[in-house]
Image (spheres, rainbow, N blue to C red):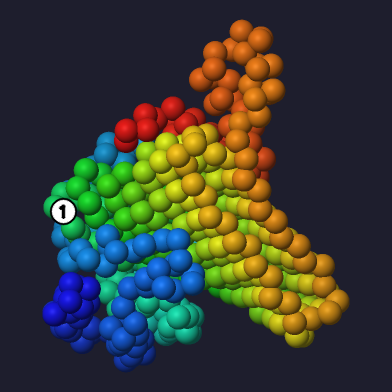
Amino acid sequence: MPAVAEELNTYLKIFEARAEDRSTEPDWLVERRNRGMQQFAEQGFPTTKHEEYRYTNLAPIAKTPFRIAGKDEVTLDDLEPFLYDEIKGDRLVFVNGRFVLALSSIETTAEDAVTTIGTLLKNEPDVIESHLARYTCERNNTLAALNGALFSDGPVIRIPAHDAWDAPVHLVFVSTASAPDTATHPRVLIIAERDSEASVIETHCGLGDTPYWSNGVTEIIAGDNSRLDHYRLQQETLSAFHTSLVEIHQGRDANVTTHSVSFGGALVRNDVEVVLEDENSECTMNGLYALNGRQHVDNRTCVDHTKPHCSSHQLYKGVLDGHSRGVFGGKIIVRPDAQKTDAFQSNKNLLLSENADINTKPQLEIDANDVKCSHGATIGQIDNEALFYLRSRGIGESEARSLLTYAFAADLLERIKFDPIRDRFEALLMTQLVRPESE
């Protein structure tokens, strides 16, 4: 049996071994899990023959028989580098895919507004039936399909209609990597009801040095006239693999802003799919990736304009040093009925090393005639004249390069409304810039 076929068989065995767990789940979820496993078994891992994975080889993941991570002990001291003590919002912590109440804090939001999939499946399964794993089942994304088949638990955030939350909810997903070749499949469901407003932070991080795989899915449903800020920080260890899908569906007059930041991981693939389902909807997508050593990070976005008078704005920036490689693939789709669409997409990259590499491919698919759409991509290096100017003012070369690089990323960081989050991202960026290439 070929190696990859053997690994597919590994996941089928894991799925079959968890049949008893599914026996207590509602029929609709069992059906969606079965559909996800079937899709994954039929299609397997994407390869470089797939156009959307042309520059990203998932063979290191596909050829490794990852098993589900077991329970492990984690303390608040272990999590301290990943938390925001200055923000007094709720926090949910999942260790190796399992909810840990002792590390969590749920005090400020409305009752049952911040909970878990496991809790709702026991008490109110009908609440999430219309959303959980429904949309990703319709996607041709085999990694998301595998997540749907194997996820154990995850947070459910429900912002009630006409409610506005001052403090963000923080979701922390920790992989302990206490044993090699383990995997987790984090699942997040966010439902912003009509006229609601909130912010949600996702942090994906790791402990330990052994290889592991985090394969996450986040589903966001933004109701009519809702406002949602979504922050997603990928801070895995440098031996980790990370794949993710963020699926967003927006109603009339809904406004969603996403901030995707990638600093960690050896091999990373982030997908963001947005569907603007009704008129006057707006989506803003900000992305920052800072790479060093031999890191590989691939960001793919797709915004589907299905109705008129909607707008989308994408700005992704990459800073690449060492022998790192970045990939960006962005697509804007404008359906025939989506007149008066306003869509903009930009990918800008700064190469700090002659050995760093970037592949970027912005795309437009327009089937309407009254639209305003544009896209662009740039690749550049440090401005030598600006570098000389700073050095002539007594600033060392390393500090001058860091200042110019920070200036390149500053407009993205300034879009973050919470000071503690922005300060943390700034510190991580500066740490990334001075990290030795050998890492």
Q: Is residue 76 left or right of residue 278?
A: left
Image vertical order of residue 266 relative to residue 414, above or below: below
- Left or right placement of residue 108 versus residue 22 in this view: right
The image shows residue 225 at horizontal and vertical percentages of 70, 69
Q: Is residue 103 visible?
A: no
Look at the image and tell me in which quarter the C terminus lies: top left
| Front-most of residues 333 and 161 | 333
Image location of residue 316, percent across then percent down: 60, 52
Camera-nearest residue between 262 and 95: 262
- Residue most toward the right? 370
Q: Residue at x 62, y 28 (%)?
A: 404
Residue at disc 1, secondary structure: loop
Question: Is 255 left, or right, of 152 in this rendering?
Answer: right
Q: Amino acid at mark 1?
A: Pro
The residue identified by callout 1 is 180
Q: Give left or right: position of 329 versus 153.
A: right
Q: Residue furthest front?
A: 354
- Seen in the picture, residue 109 relative to 81 is either above or below; the reply is below
The location of residue 73, given as percent across then percent down, is: 17, 49
Question: Residue 381 placed where, x, y %?
Answer: 60, 35
User: Looking at the image, can residue 248 be seen?
Assistant: yes
Assign the N terminus to one quadrant of the image: bottom left
Q: Residues within 10 Å of mark 1 (few under 14, many from 20)?
A: some
